[in-house]
Image: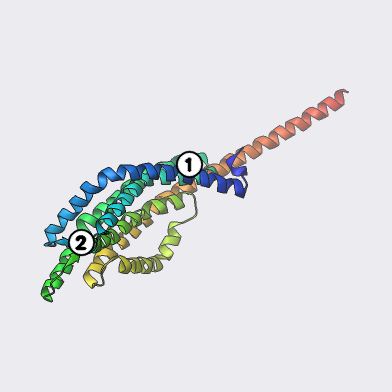
Amino acid sequence: MNPKDLTIIEHIEELRKRLFIVAVFFALALFGGFFVAKPLIKYLQGTAGDYGITLNVFDVTTPLTIYFQVIFLVAFILSSPLLMYQLWAFVSPGLREVERRATLSYIPYAFLLFLVGLSFSYFWLFPYVMKAMMTLSNEMDFQQTIGIYEYFSFLFKLVIPFGILFQLPIVMLFLSRIGLVTPMLLARIRKYAYFALFVCAAVIAPPELTSHLMVSVPLFVLYEISLMISRIGYRKYLKSEELRLKEEQEAEEKRQIEEALALQQRQIEELNQ
């Protein structure tokens, strides 16, 4: 059966099967995360010493909570390429062949951008924010006693959203490639997008102006990069549409010629009878 001819129920069933595949792989990734979590926690805990911080545990279950949070994070990162592939496979029947091939190639880049976003926020943004917060605390003569749960929660809150937000160029490229979004639209709604990104930065960053700007400015730059990439995708979409219309026109002309020839053949046969 052609995937385009599936009913809504069959589409839901197909989506359920694909999500089940992702869930099975996620479970396997969770098992692998058990071996990675402890070394990763020790590494992240060790970097806290660079800011003059001694991490403390205030209740019995905190180490277990942190342990499972890191396991789930590792499993999510490992499963994300498969998740993106399954989502692509679900929507690909609605795309033309050239669009399917093009959009499939976006998956490795999306995963790479996710890692770049994590790395950017952890190695550049997070140290700056931490040093700014510690400097402010020292200037106000506050003696900080930081719990490991609070430290990791703050780390995840700052780092993980950037991994997701760095998908913006690929998302815009994909939507432009299939014609759902145009660069003209992105340029027209720029001020609203900036406001939305500014709000996102307020949620991610600490309530301090410099840190807020350190988060906002990269997001604005990311939007402008997405706009430029969208122009590339939209040009390819227009070229693809032009080719599609040409193929349809040629197919229609061929059909009309075949019908005319068939009609002529029938008339000849009738005259010969």
Q: Provide residue 181's location: percent of width, then percent of height.
A: 47, 56
Q: Provide residue 71's location: percent of width, then percent of height.
A: 30, 49
Q: Provide residue 220's location: percent of width, then percent of height.
A: 32, 63
Q: State the SS at label 1.
A: helix
Disc 1 residue crowd, few under 14, some 14–19, many 20+, Cα 10 Å: some
The residue located at (56%, 49%) in the rendering is: 12
With 94 as the anchor, is 261 left or right in this view? right
Compare residues 83 and 55 and report the one nearer the observer: 55
Determine the residue located farthest toward the bottom in the rendered image.
140
Residue receiving disc 1: 100
Q: CA distance from mark 1 to mark 2?
A: 50 Å
The residue located at (38%, 57%) in the rendering is: 227
Q: Which amino acid is tagged 2? A: Val
Q: Provide residue 35's location: percent of width, then percent of height.
A: 26, 43
Q: State the SS at label 2.
A: loop
With 252 as the anchor, is 40 left or right in this view? left
Residue 107 appears in the rendering: no
Q: Quadrant of residue 206?
A: bottom left
Location of residue 36 with respect to 134 vertically, above or below: above
The residue located at (23%, 67%) in the rendering is: 211
Determine the residue located farthest toward the front in the rendered image.
60
Q: Quadrant of the N terminus?
A: top right
Q: Quadrant of residue 151?
A: bottom left
Nearer the observer, disc 1 or disc 2?
2
Residue receiving disc 2: 57
Disc 2 residue crowd, few under 14, some 14–19, many 20+, Cα 10 Å: few
With 258 as the anchor, is 152 left or right in this view? left
Residue 250 appears in the rendering: yes
